[in-house]
């Protein structure tokens, strides 16, 4: 039987290789003015990937550090699904790194992802389905945008939904009322 430490080492090595292969594509989001909690500015070339180079900055939604997560703790149910979700702060820090290396679109995508962490998964799926062509009226899309902005403070995503409503109207992709 394979020892638990061996399995953990293998998983860490696989993840490290995935990060290397995908390069800055795994970088995640924040406004470029966000500073690391310790007060020093992130240095994209030095601090990417955060999980390896700056694990002190990465926390789970429940406040656990990456070092608090192990296969043994998962098996003992000390680590649950909420401990494995990414936080808006981590996404913002990753966005800062992405922007710092000139990956502006990736940084914007990460900022949108950071906003979406506040929206329940089932609502995200409903919104996704509503945004498909011919699924919603313009007013329904505008209502979704308003909800995203006011209820979840997802201003970047709300603007995207509003833009989608305008584009769908121009291209005749709205559901007939």
Image (cartoon, rainbow, N blue to C red):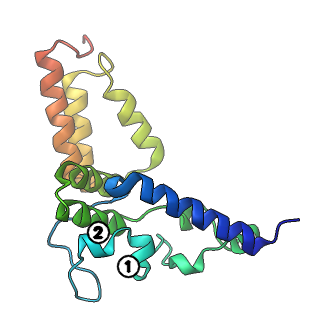
Checking the image for residue 86, the label placed there is: none
Residue at x 25%, y 66% (from the top left corner) = 97
Residue found at the very far bottom of the displayed protein: 38
Rendered location of residue 40, percent (x, y): 22, 86
Rendered location of residue 94, percent (x, y): 31, 64
Is residue 3 visible in this depiction of the protein? yes
Residue at x 59%, y 67% (from the top left corner) = 12
Rendered location of residue 30, percent (x, y): 24, 64
Q: Check disc 2 and report the residue beneath it.
A: 93
Q: Quadrant of the N terminus?
A: bottom right
Earlier-in-chain disc, 1 versus 2: 1
Q: Residues within 10 Å of mark 1 (few under 14, many from 20)?
A: some
Quadrant location of residue 49? bottom left
**Callout 1: SS:** helix
Q: Is residue 74 found left or right of 68 in the rendered image?
A: right
Q: Check disc 1 and report the residue beneath it.
A: 57
Is residue 118 visible in this depiction of the protein? no
Is the C-beta separation of discs 1 and 2 under 8 Å? Answer: yes
Number of marks in the rendered image: 2
Label 1 and label 2: CA atoms lie apart by 9 Å
Residue nearer the viewer, 43 or 67: 43
**Callout 2: SS:** helix
Q: Residues within 10 Å of mark 2 (few under 14, many from 20)?
A: many
Rendered location of residue 107, percent (x, y): 23, 55
Quadrant location of residue 98? bottom left
């Amino acid at each position: 039987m394979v020892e638990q430490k061996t399995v953990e080492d293998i998983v860490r090595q696989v993840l490290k290789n995935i990060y290397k292969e995908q390069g800055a594509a795994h970088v995640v989001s924040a406004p470029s003015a966000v500073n690391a909690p310790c007060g020093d500015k992130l240095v994209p070339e030095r601090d990417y990937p955060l999980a390896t180079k700056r694990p002190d900055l990465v926390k789970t939604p429940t406040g656990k550090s990456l070092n608090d997560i192990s296969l043994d703790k998962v098996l003992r149910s000390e680590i649950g699904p909420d401990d494995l979700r990414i936080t808006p702060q981590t996404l913002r820090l990753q966005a800062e790194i992405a922007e710092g290396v000139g990956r502006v679109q990736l940084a914007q995508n990460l900022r949108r992802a950071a906003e979406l962490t506040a929206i329940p998964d089932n609502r995200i799926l409903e919104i996704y389905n509503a945004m498909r062509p011919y699924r919603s009226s313009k007013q329904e899309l505008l209502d979704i945008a308003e909800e995203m902005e006011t209820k979840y403070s997802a201003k970047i995503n709300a603007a995207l939904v509003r833009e989608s409503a305008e584009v769908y109207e121009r291209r005749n992709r709205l559901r007939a009322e």
